[in-house]
Amino acid sequence: MSSNRAEVHPVDSVPQVGALGALALQHVLTMYAGAITVPLLVASALHLSSENTAYLVSADLFACGLVTLLQSLGVGAFGIRLPIIMGVTFVGVMPSIAIANQPGMGLPAVYGAAIAAGLIVIPLVPLIGRLRSVLTPTVTGTAMLLIGLSLMGIAVDWSAGGQGAKDYGSPTHLLLASVTVGIILLVTRFGVGFLANCAILIGMASGYILAAAMGLVDLTDATAAPALQLITPFHFGMPIFDLGAIASMVVVLLVTLVESSGMLTMLGDIVDRPVTTRDLSRGLRADCMGAVIGGLFNSFPYTSYAQNIALVSMTGVRSRFVCAGAAVILLILALFPKLSAVVAAVPPSVLGGAALVLFGMVAASGIRSLAAAGLDHSREDLLVVAISLGVGLIPTFSDRFFASAPPALAPFTHSGVLLGIVTAIALNLFLRAGRNRNESDADQRDTDIRGLPTATSGTIGG
């Protein structure tokens, strides 16, 4: 029996119930701030009611749990079976808002696009490796930088009290945002280990408590919310399948999969179970199915969370069943709408302070990728970044620039992230083709020179 137990890989080991529960809760706390920020962000941008905002938070936690179970435990050809926590991706935030803001579309069009994109991309998973040559670090770095910059305007508005607030920019709002940022910095500076990983969550909780002490938290909706509520498919209506919206979500999913492939490969090395091509395909299929599950249960596309991978590395706990336990906790939390209503009651200024850090980190991740791409050695890559950033920021600085564009293109023209990604891909292909041709011509010239007959070759004049 002891020999069989020794043969079990740490990834497949099951900790004692008490330890499993504590370790699983640690994973939930690590990802919670990032997970709830996206539904709160979308709800704020779409001006949803407090009740619908709370439901969106619950739906997100529910879908997080389902997709994490699929990825960590696996079902047939889906799931990489490693300690993975899945959370909603920031790549899809601005495209989702752009889709939902179109006349006659709303959230049902976002969910229809997510479902269709997931089903469309699943058969393309074996080709993702080839996409790496197109979605280079220059392209993905530009995309992450654009995501962070595009979201930063929302974070600034939140910090000032939220758009439409009568006391927009008041000292009270600025104080709450500053305190939230300050607590995050203090925890990051002086916290160690897991505590430092939860800096954003602790900062939000501290700002929330201060706001409540100042009488700025309204828990009326939390009091009125039912004690228990099931998450049902299509809560916001039957999905709408719009071709433009679907195309934009396919781009989002392809970018997400390229990022995920790197994350999953890195995790395989961390837990000492190298990821094979078959493993990676199973993991990426689960990502695609995550978009489908998100669309069915009123949420958004999902990806592996880097902070939880960092937690695995830090703690050395490699059991995938710990992440499955975290998924169960998320599913349970989703059933309690009072909790989601409490989360939805976070004052905008507190959320804005946390968002300034969170979205800034997204932009900084893009800068780090661009630095790793070695832009100082490539004029072509510099042009890709420069032009893509310029095009991608158009919707941020002018909402009328594409006023004459066909309505069918609205999901693209209203999303700077998608505009930037598509521009970066097109420029990368165009400039790389020219670079390859120039290199080929130079190689051919070198070959021709090396192949010229010399005076000693005995071939001159035949």
Image (tube, rainbow, N blue to C red):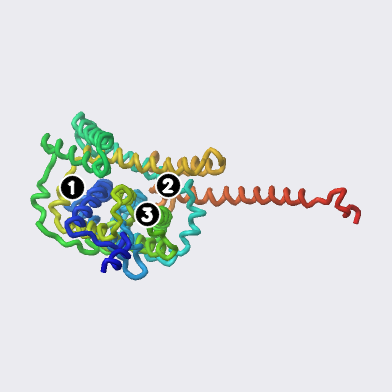
Toward the right, the furthest residue is 461
Q: Position of residue 76 (x, y in %)?
A: 34, 70
Callout 1 environment at 10 Å: few (<14), some (14 to 19), or many (20+)? many
- The answer to whether 360 is drawn above or below residue 447 in the figure is above
Question: In the image shown, does 235 or 286 lie closer to the viewer?
Answer: 286
Which residue occupies 12% across, 52% down?
338
The x, y position of residue 133, in whole percent, is 51, 54
The crowding category of the residue bearing disc 3, from other C-alpha atoms within 10 Å (few below 14, some 14 to 19, many at least 20), is many
Asked whether, in this view, residue 34 is left or right of residue 116, the answer is left
Gap between marks 3 and 1, in whole Å?
A: 31 Å
Say which residue label 1 marks: 343
Mark 3 sits on what residue? 267
Between residues 395 and 134, which one lies in front from this camera angle?
Answer: 134
Front-lying residue, 108 or 12: 12
Q: Split into 4 quadrants, where in the image is the N terminus?
A: bottom left
Q: Amino acid at mark 1?
A: Val
Which residue carries the number 2 mark? Answer: 143
Q: Residue furthest front?
A: 2
Horizontally, is 144 left or right of 6 in the view? right
Q: Label 3's element?
A: helix
User: Visible in this render: residue 373?
Assistant: yes
Mark-to-mark CA distance, 2 and 3: 23 Å
The answer to whether residue 77 is left or right of residue 46 is right
The spot of residue 10 in percent (x, y) is 31, 59
